[in-house]
């Protein structure tokens, strides 16, 4: 498997979905729409699935239809005590560090949230950078342009040499159509139209041993110039 670049989703992928963190974030989204925007519970409950289906994220929908302040929204919905939900997993850390490829977090969240999550999980040194919603110009998965921009920011010009890991089929299926190799990381969803499926990241070596055979050991330090790469900046 000649993979050079790994794009890895953040929430519910780097940690198990059973933690409840993503449910808490969704709850904060609902509260924002009701308390900050004056919507009824019924309206907020109707709009969130609509936004997810139409735009890929609640934020993109609120930006498009209500001109919401993205910075305020992101700060509000991610204002949660992460240590109450997440804990480090040394097996995940060692799996990531052992991979020879370039490794990037690719998230629809912002860098501030991603940085906090990585710190709590003790995975900061496992990645070359964070490709977040700001680096993408507020594009987001599953928009095809978000994937092309992510590849550009990661310094990868061949989607067929890129493995994309995510917990949501709605993000993986469009990526596969663009030529990326796709890996579903989710214990509760059946493989359907993607290339590979594992329950947790700790299953990666057993499921895809070829990742460790495809390239010589990749030296993360100095491989990407932080000063010239916009995805490495806040």
Image: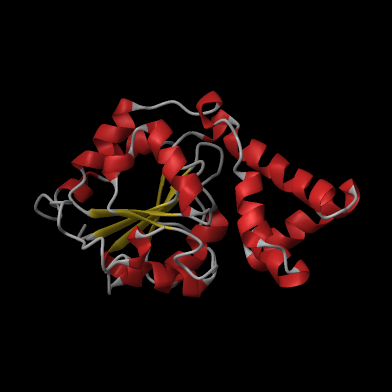
| Residue 76 falls left or right of residue 19 | right
Quarter of image, res 23: top right
Q: Residue at x 53, y 32 (%)?
A: 82
Judge left or right: residue 234 versus residue 127.
right
Q: Position of residue 70 (x, y in %)?
A: 63, 61
Q: Is residue 68 visible?
A: yes
Along the horizontal axis of the image, is 44 left or right of 111?
A: right
Residue for point 60% across, 35% down = 80
Q: Position of residue 128 (x, y in %)?
A: 27, 53
- Image spot of residue 27 (x, y percent): 72, 40
* Quarter placement of the N terminus: bottom left
Could one spot residue 205 in this view of the protein? no
Above or below residue 157? Residue 79 is above
Q: Nearer the viewer, residue 203 or 52?
A: 52
- Report the front residue among 44 and 70: 70
Task: Say above or below: 93 vs 112.
Answer: above
Is 218 or 78 nearer to us in this picture? Answer: 78
Residue ID at (56%, 38%): 188
| Residue 233 in picture, x, y percent from top left | 36, 60
Q: What residue is at 50 percent from the left and 44 percent from the top?
A: 11
User: The C terminus appears in which quarter of the rendering?
Assistant: bottom left
Q: How is the image coloured?
A: secondary structure
């Amino acid at each position: 498997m000649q993979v050079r670049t790994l794009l890895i989703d953040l929430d519910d992928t780097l940690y198990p979905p059973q933690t409840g963190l993503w449910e808490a974030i969704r709850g904060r989204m609902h509260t924002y729409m009701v308390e900050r925007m004056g919507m009824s519970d019924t309206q907020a409950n109707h709009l969130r699935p609509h936004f997810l289906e139409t735009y890929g994220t609640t934020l993109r929908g609120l930006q498009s239809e209500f001109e919401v302040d993205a910075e305020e929204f992101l700060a509000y919905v991610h204002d949660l005590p992460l240590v109450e939900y997440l804990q480090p997993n040394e097996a995940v850390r060692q799996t990531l560090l052992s991979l020879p490829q370039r490794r990037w977090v690719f998230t629809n969240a912002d860098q501030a949230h991603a940085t906090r999550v990585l710190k709590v999980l003790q995975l900061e040194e496992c990645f070359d950078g964070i490709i977040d919603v700001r680096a993408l110009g507020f594009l987001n998965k599953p928009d095809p342009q978000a994937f092309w921009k992510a590849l550009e920011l990661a310094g990868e010009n061949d989607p067929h040499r890129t493995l994309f890991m995510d917990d949501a089929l709605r993000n993986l299926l469009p990526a596969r159509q663009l030529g990326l190799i796709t890996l579903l990381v989710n214990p509760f969803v059946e493989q359907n139209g993607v290339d590979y499926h594992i329950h947790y990241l700790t299953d990666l070596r057993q499921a895809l041993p070829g990742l460790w055979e495809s390239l010589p050991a990749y030296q993360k330090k100095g491989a990407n110039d932080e000063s010239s790469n916009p995805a490495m900046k806040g």
